Image (tube, grey):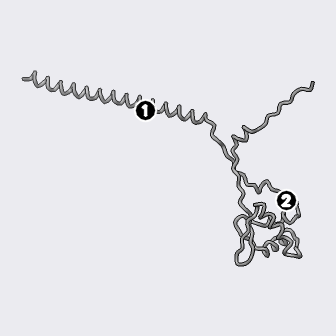
Amino acid sequence: MIKLLLRTVFRSLRSIQDWADEGAENERTYQNSQININQQNNKNINQISKMSVPQYRVINVWNYLTFKEGSQAHHITKILDFEEWIPMEEILRRVNELFGIQYQNERSLYPYLKTLVDAGLLEASMLGGKMRWRKKNLMQTINLMEEIENEVVVHSQPLQ
Protein backbone atom coordinates (compact mmCIF):
# COMPACT_ATOMS: atom_id res chain seq x y z
CA MET A 1 0.00 0.00 0.00
CA ILE A 2 2.74 2.40 0.87
CA LYS A 3 4.44 1.41 -2.35
CA LEU A 4 1.35 2.30 -4.30
CA LEU A 5 1.05 5.63 -2.56
CA LEU A 6 4.73 6.46 -3.17
CA ARG A 7 4.45 5.50 -6.86
CA THR A 8 1.45 7.76 -7.29
CA VAL A 9 3.24 10.68 -5.62
CA PHE A 10 6.40 10.15 -7.69
CA ARG A 11 4.40 9.88 -10.92
CA SER A 12 2.64 13.14 -10.19
CA LEU A 13 5.99 14.77 -9.35
CA ARG A 14 7.43 13.41 -12.61
CA SER A 15 4.48 14.80 -14.58
CA ILE A 16 5.03 18.18 -12.88
CA GLN A 17 8.72 18.03 -13.81
CA ASP A 18 7.84 17.11 -17.42
CA TRP A 19 5.41 20.02 -17.52
CA ALA A 20 8.10 22.38 -16.17
CA ASP A 21 10.65 21.12 -18.71
CA GLU A 22 8.11 21.54 -21.50
CA GLY A 23 7.48 25.15 -20.38
CA ALA A 24 11.22 25.88 -20.36
CA GLU A 25 11.57 24.42 -23.85
CA ASN A 26 8.63 26.51 -25.05
CA GLU A 27 10.29 29.56 -23.51
CA ARG A 28 13.55 28.81 -25.36
CA THR A 29 11.65 28.35 -28.62
CA TYR A 30 9.84 31.65 -28.06
CA GLN A 31 13.11 33.46 -27.32
CA ASN A 32 14.75 31.99 -30.43
CA SER A 33 11.81 33.08 -32.57
CA GLN A 34 12.04 36.59 -31.09
CA ILE A 35 15.76 36.70 -31.89
CA ASN A 36 15.03 35.62 -35.48
CA ILE A 37 12.32 38.28 -35.80
CA ASN A 38 14.68 40.96 -34.43
CA GLN A 39 17.43 39.90 -36.84
CA GLN A 40 14.99 40.03 -39.76
CA ASN A 41 13.81 43.50 -38.66
CA ASN A 42 17.42 44.69 -38.45
CA LYS A 43 18.05 43.39 -41.98
CA ASN A 44 14.95 45.22 -43.23
CA ILE A 45 16.02 48.43 -41.50
CA ASN A 46 19.50 48.17 -43.01
CA GLN A 47 18.04 47.59 -46.46
CA ILE A 48 15.74 50.59 -46.08
CA SER A 49 18.57 52.81 -44.85
CA LYS A 50 20.72 51.76 -47.81
CA MET A 51 17.98 52.72 -50.24
CA SER A 52 18.28 56.29 -51.42
CA VAL A 53 15.56 58.22 -49.66
CA PRO A 54 14.63 61.25 -51.75
CA GLN A 55 15.38 64.50 -50.01
CA TYR A 56 13.35 67.56 -50.82
CA ARG A 57 13.90 71.24 -50.29
CA VAL A 58 11.11 73.80 -50.44
CA ILE A 59 12.13 77.21 -51.71
CA ASN A 60 10.29 80.50 -51.90
CA VAL A 61 10.63 81.94 -55.40
CA TRP A 62 10.38 85.48 -54.00
CA ASN A 63 13.81 84.99 -52.38
CA TYR A 64 15.34 84.69 -55.86
CA LEU A 65 13.47 87.52 -57.60
CA THR A 66 15.15 90.91 -57.68
CA PHE A 67 13.85 94.08 -59.24
CA LYS A 68 15.77 97.20 -60.20
CA GLU A 69 16.26 99.29 -57.08
CA GLY A 70 14.04 102.39 -57.05
CA SER A 71 11.72 101.14 -59.79
CA GLN A 72 7.94 100.95 -59.42
CA ALA A 73 8.11 97.14 -59.51
CA HIS A 74 10.64 97.22 -56.66
CA HIS A 75 8.38 99.50 -54.60
CA ILE A 76 5.31 97.36 -55.24
CA THR A 77 6.97 94.05 -54.33
CA LYS A 78 8.44 95.47 -51.12
CA ILE A 79 5.09 96.93 -50.03
CA LEU A 80 2.75 94.01 -50.71
CA ASP A 81 2.22 91.06 -48.38
CA PHE A 82 1.18 87.44 -48.85
CA GLU A 83 -1.83 87.53 -46.54
CA GLU A 84 -3.26 91.04 -46.71
CA TRP A 85 -5.21 92.45 -49.68
CA ILE A 86 -3.98 96.04 -50.11
CA PRO A 87 -5.86 98.80 -52.01
CA MET A 88 -4.14 101.46 -54.14
CA GLU A 89 -4.42 104.20 -51.47
CA GLU A 90 -2.58 102.01 -48.96
CA ILE A 91 0.10 101.11 -51.53
CA LEU A 92 0.73 104.81 -52.23
CA ARG A 93 0.82 105.60 -48.49
CA ARG A 94 3.32 102.80 -47.79
CA VAL A 95 5.57 103.78 -50.71
CA ASN A 96 5.63 107.35 -49.37
CA GLU A 97 6.31 106.11 -45.85
CA LEU A 98 9.04 103.57 -46.70
CA PHE A 99 10.77 105.14 -49.70
CA GLY A 100 9.85 108.82 -49.35
CA ILE A 101 8.50 108.90 -52.91
CA GLN A 102 5.14 110.43 -53.70
CA TYR A 103 3.58 109.52 -57.03
CA GLN A 104 1.76 112.47 -58.63
CA ASN A 105 -0.65 110.23 -60.51
CA GLU A 106 -2.22 107.17 -58.92
CA ARG A 107 -2.49 105.60 -62.35
CA SER A 108 1.29 105.41 -62.74
CA LEU A 109 1.44 102.18 -60.72
CA TYR A 110 -1.43 100.38 -62.48
CA PRO A 111 0.61 99.19 -65.51
CA TYR A 112 3.26 97.72 -63.20
CA LEU A 113 0.65 96.04 -61.02
CA LYS A 114 -1.09 94.61 -64.09
CA THR A 115 2.20 93.32 -65.51
CA LEU A 116 3.06 91.61 -62.22
CA VAL A 117 -0.45 90.09 -62.07
CA ASP A 118 -0.16 88.89 -65.69
CA ALA A 119 3.24 87.36 -64.91
CA GLY A 120 1.65 85.39 -62.06
CA LEU A 121 3.57 87.10 -59.27
CA LEU A 122 0.63 89.02 -57.79
CA GLU A 123 -3.06 88.32 -57.26
CA ALA A 124 -5.75 90.94 -57.85
CA SER A 125 -9.34 91.11 -56.65
CA MET A 126 -12.19 93.56 -56.92
CA LEU A 127 -13.77 94.07 -53.51
CA GLY A 128 -16.44 96.72 -53.08
CA GLY A 129 -15.59 98.36 -56.40
CA LYS A 130 -11.91 98.81 -55.45
CA MET A 131 -8.98 96.82 -56.75
CA ARG A 132 -6.78 95.15 -54.14
CA TRP A 133 -3.55 93.24 -54.60
CA ARG A 134 -1.35 90.82 -52.72
CA LYS A 135 1.72 88.69 -53.44
CA LYS A 136 1.17 85.16 -54.66
CA ASN A 137 2.71 82.50 -52.45
CA LEU A 138 5.23 80.96 -54.86
CA MET A 139 6.73 77.85 -53.25
CA GLN A 140 8.67 75.28 -55.25
CA THR A 141 9.74 71.81 -54.13
CA ILE A 142 13.11 70.61 -55.40
CA ASN A 143 14.22 66.98 -55.26
CA LEU A 144 17.86 67.13 -54.15
CA MET A 145 18.61 63.64 -55.49
CA GLU A 146 17.53 64.67 -59.01
CA GLU A 147 19.72 67.76 -58.74
CA ILE A 148 22.74 65.61 -57.91
CA GLU A 149 21.98 63.17 -60.76
CA ASN A 150 21.56 66.04 -63.23
CA GLU A 151 24.84 67.72 -62.30
CA VAL A 152 27.26 67.92 -65.16
CA VAL A 153 30.80 66.96 -64.34
CA VAL A 154 33.35 68.67 -66.54
CA HIS A 155 36.76 67.12 -66.83
CA SER A 156 39.48 69.19 -68.33
CA GLN A 157 41.54 67.56 -71.00
CA PRO A 158 45.11 68.56 -71.66
CA LEU A 159 45.75 70.63 -74.76
CA GLN A 160 47.67 68.86 -77.49
* Residue, far top: 3
Kind of residue at badge 1: Gln
Q: Quadrant of residue 148?
A: top right
The one of 112 and 94 positioned closer to us in this rendering: 112
* Alpha carbon separation for disc pair 1 and 2: 64 Å
Residue at 75% in and 64% down: 122
What kind of element bears circle 2?
A: loop
- Reading the image, the residue beneath label 2 is 67
Picture quarter with the N terminus: top left
Q: Is residue 95 left or right of residue 7?
A: right
The one of 18 and 108 positioned closer to us in this rendering: 108
The one of 45 and 107 positioned closer to us in this rendering: 107
Residue 141 lies, in percent from the top left, at 69, 50
Residue at 53% in and 34% down: 44
The one of 158 and 57 positioned closer to us in this rendering: 158
Residue 89 lies, in percent from the top left, at 79, 76
Residue at 84% in and 68% down: 111
Kind of residue at badge 2: Phe
What kind of element bears circle 1?
A: helix
* Residue, far right: 160
- Reading the image, the residue beneath label 1 is 34
Q: Quadrant of residue 81?
A: bottom right
Q: Is residue 75 left or right of residue 160?
A: left
Q: Quadrant of residue 118?
A: bottom right
Picture quarter with the C terminus: top right
Instruction: Tell which tag, 1 or 2, sits nearer the viewer.
Output: 2
Q: For the image shown, how many numbered marks are present on the structure?
A: 2
Sooner in the amino-acid sequence: mark 1 or mark 2? 1
